[in-house]
Image (cartoon, rainbow, N blue to C red):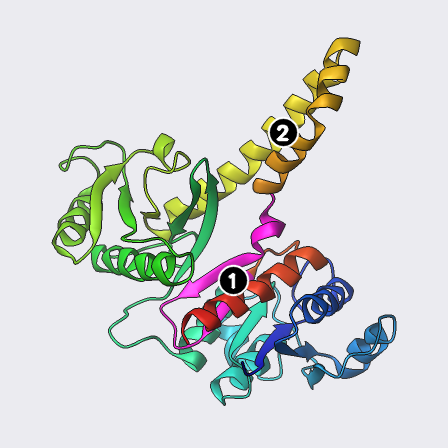
Amino acid sequence: MSKLTIAVDTLGGDLGAEVVVAGAIQAVTEFSDINLVLVGPKDEISGLLKKHPSSNRIEILHAPDVILPSESPTLAFRRKKESSIVVGLKHVKEGHASGFVSAGSTGALLTGATVIIGRQKGIERPALGTLLPTPKGFTLLMDCGANMDAKPSYIKQFGEIGADYMKRVMGVNNPRVGLINVGAEEEKGNAAAKEAHILLKAADLNFIGNIEGREISTGTVDVAVCDGYTGNIVLKFMEGFAKTMLGMIKEELMSTTLSKIGALMAKGAFGRLKKRFDYREVGGAPFLGLNNIVIKAHGSSDALAIKNAIRQCVIFERSNN
C-alpha cells in the first residue's frame, strides 16, 4: 500500500503551531502509511520539530502569512497569496498531497477550497459535514456552517454527498437521510424546506422525510440535512449542552459521600461517555463535494484533535481506492 501525503496548516488555530506539530508527530507515529507536509513559517516549525523525535516522514512547506477569522474570507484569499491556507490548498491542487487539514478560518478555507481545489462535477456548493454521536453510532449533520443561505437544490445535494460519505467512509449500508424541520408532515416548514423535501423525495436516496430537532441525536437517520445557518446552531447547541450536562452530572456525583462511591464504581462508564461527546475524538469536519478531501479542524483543536483530523483524511482517501 503506497503512502499518502497530507498537508497540515500550522497557522490559524487558537492554540498555535506547537499543538499542530505535536499532533503531526502523533499521526506519523500511529499511521505508518502517511507522509505529512506542515505548512507555515519554516523557522518556527523547524524549531518546534526539534522538541520531538525526528521523522523523515514530515516535511515543511514555507508559508509566512495567516488568514485571521476576523478578516473577510474573499478579500483575504485574494490578498494573502502566501497564507498557509492558500499555499496548502495549492499543494494539494498540484498533486503533491492528497488532502489538507486546517484549524483556520472556515470562510477562508471554504473560499480557497472551492476556487483552488474545485467542486466535483455537478455539485453546486460544497458542504461542511460533522459526525454527531448517537446511541447507534453517528449521524452526519450536513451542512453545519459552510452555506448560511442554501437553495433547496443545495440541500438535496447535501443529502446525496452526505449519504455517499456515510456509505463509503463510515460503512453504512443504504444510509437514511432526513430533512431537519419543525414537524414530520410534508407540508411543514418554510418555503425552502418544502421545496427541499420535494427534491429529496424525488432523489435516488433512502429519504425518510422530515425529522424534528429532538430526533437528530437519536440515530433515527444517518444523514441530517439543512442549511448551514440551522446546522451551525444545532452543532453549537449540542456541543454546549453536552458540556453542561456532563458538568452537572459530575457536580451531582460529587455532592455526597454515597454518590462519590457510586461515581468511583462507574468511573469507566462515565469516561467512555465523555469520550463519545469529545469533538477531539472525531478530529474535524470534512468539506464534502470537492475534488480532494479538505478537513476543517475545530479552532481550539489540541494535538489529539489534529491527529484525528489527519486520521479522517487517511480513512477518506483509503475509501476512494
Element class at badge 1: helix
Q: Amino acid at mark 2?
A: Leu
Q: Residue at x 55, y 83 (%)?
A: 2
Task: Give the quadrant of the C terminus.
Answer: bottom left
Instruction: Judge from the rendering whether residue 6 lies leftward or rightward of residue 317; answer left or right.
Output: right
Q: Of the residues shown, which amino acid type is indicated by label 1?
A: Thr
Q: On the rendered structure, is 64 left or right of 114?
A: right
| Numbered range of the magenta stretch | 277-296
The label on residue 246 is 2
Give coordinates of residue 241: x percent, y percent: 54, 32
Nearer-the-camera pick, 156 or 112: 156
Quadrant for residue 266, please give it: top right
Q: Position of residue 3 (x, y in %)?
A: 58, 81
Is residue 127 rendered magenta in the image?
Answer: no
Q: Is residue 105 visible?
A: no
**Where residue 188 sits in the image (x, y, percent)?**
18, 35
Q: Is residue 279 magenta?
A: yes
Q: Please tell me which of labels 1 and 2 falls first in the chain.
A: 1
Depth check, front residue: 201 or 232:
201
219 in relation to 122, above or below: above
Local crowd size for mark 2, using a 10 Å CA cut-off: few (<14), some (14–19), many (≥20): some
Q: Residue furthest right?
A: 51
Does residue 146 appear left or right of residue 297 in this picture? Answer: left
Q: Residue at x 72, y 13 (%)?
A: 259
Between marks 1 and 2 in the image, the one whose residue lies nearer the viewer: 2
| Residue beneath disc 1 | 106
Residue 65 image-quadrant placement: bottom right
Instruction: Please report the residue visible at 71 percent of the width from the left and 83 percent of the height from the top.
Output: 60
